[in-house]
Image: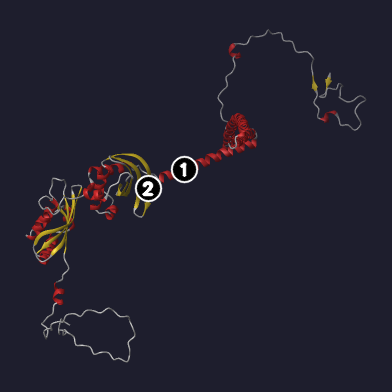
Amino acid sequence: MSTDHDGNDGSDGDPPGGPAPGAPPPGASGSIDVQISGAKLPRVDAAPVAVGREDSRPLGSGRIAAVPGEPADTRARRITDAAKDALDAGVSKLGSGLDTLGDGVSKLGEGVSRLGDISRKVPVVGSSVSKLGEGITHVGASLHVLPRAARTRRGRLLIRSMIVGFVLVAAWIGVIVALQLHGNDTPDFRPNAERILVDLSKGAIDEIYEQASPRFQEMVRKERFTDDMTDLTETVGKFREITAINDSLVTTGPTGRIGRVSVTAAYEKATCKVAVSLHYDQDRWKLLGLGVELPAELTISQAQREDRVKACKDPMDLKHCDVHQAADAVLSRLKEGHADHVWEDASPVFQKQEKKAKFIQLQLEHLVALGNYRRIIAVSEAKVIGGTSATFDALAEFDKASGVRTVFGLVRRSKLDPWRLRSFKIVLPMPRGAEDAADKPSGPPSSPPAPSSPPRPSSPPRPSSPPRPSSPPAPSSPPLHPAPRDAGPK
């Protein structure tokens, strides 16, 4: 029996009645003849054989090896697709969380709106609460829309772009803030200010001045600084602690880096605001300025300030005023010609300011012009600052001049040490001998003067009237005193 591929029975597969006229032969149609030997399965006489355990055990999967010759861009594309899938999964989870958050925010907005409806009777509070509820409801609706956008391909792309943009902007802001913080790093000036205030309170004023900035030493004299700091200690008492840091600032100018710190300092008698300015010089911060604002309840009169620096009760008392004794001793040794001993006993500051030979020569010139020293006749100023620095301004009498101003600057390490010369100045009087000689006549007058007649009483002034031209002026009378000849050099 034979059949073709379309299942029609027949020997040649032609339709009944034979092949159609003009049809191609069966071999040329492209069909395949299938021969079937029988409709039944062949019979097997052999007995079935059991399968062993080793053959029935499942085979394990081997390691997955990369296909050789796979291009690198295909692997990169696979990694990128995996990262996108992970990011999409994260965005989907974020959308689900935002969806839940949106439901909660919407419910919160509805609750606040109801609260606004209840409190609408209150004029201002009711309307504000209602607006707040509406705003929260809008936020909840926006959070509802975001998860829906995250489910679409375009929405996921938008959210990924937004996250990347946020990351880039946050990184750029972090870099800018780090650069600004690094460039404007303000150091901690509290230890510097505390050290300065403690040393001033202990009386180490000279050390603070010597360690200060050169700009500060140019603007403020050491005597003035010592006087002010001593008066400050007497006014507010000893320094205790810094209770607060009010402000810190660092600037850069023509003189370099300048730092300023404003603190609140506690003293024994008051709490004051203190401003300390520092100058960065030679790799360290040095004192540039100091200002103390005293409280209003702490008032000090000028008389009290003068009493604090008063050298002694009676500056003219030579026996009981040690500053007067030191000045008198210096002038007496200069009169005896011991200017070299005066220079050797002076302070190192005085010796640096003026050389020994020049000082001796200058004192010899003063001795020739003024003569020998006699005594001090008056004291203009005598004050002691902190017990270690003194100023004595007095008028001295010499053989050839009286009332010569002499100014002494004295210093000592402690109250038990003797005073040493820190500065010395003598103000020479103006030369008046030549002027007195020029005012006197060089010779006697040619004729003795006649006795003068008593003056006539003056008549009261008459009103001014124009002179009459008809009356000629009366002849002038001769002078009572003849003018001297050759009264002075022409």
Tag 1's secondary structure? Answer: helix
Q: Height in image: 251 above or below 123?
A: below
Q: Left of 303 or right of it: where is 144?
A: right
Which image quarter holds the C terminus?
bottom left
| Res. 5 image quadrant | top right
Q: Nearer the viewer, residue 476 or 207?
A: 476
Query: Where is mark 1, residue-wise?
Result: 175
> Mark 1 Cα within 10 Å, few/some/many (few <14, many 20+)?
few
The answer to whether the residues at label 1 and label 2 have Cβ atoms under 8 Å apart is no
Q: Nearer the viewer, residue 404 or 416?
A: 404
Q: What's the distance in space between the residues labelled 1 and 2, CA to CA?
A: 22 Å
Q: Position of residue 458 (x, y in %)?
A: 23, 79
Residue 64 located left or right of residue 283: right
Q: Residue furthest left?
A: 336
Residue 350 appears in the rendering: yes
The crowd level at tag 2 (other Cα within 10 Å; few <14, some 14-19, many 20+) is some
Q: How many marks?
A: 2
Three-letter code for the amino acid on which mark 2 is drawn: Val
Residue tagged 2: 250
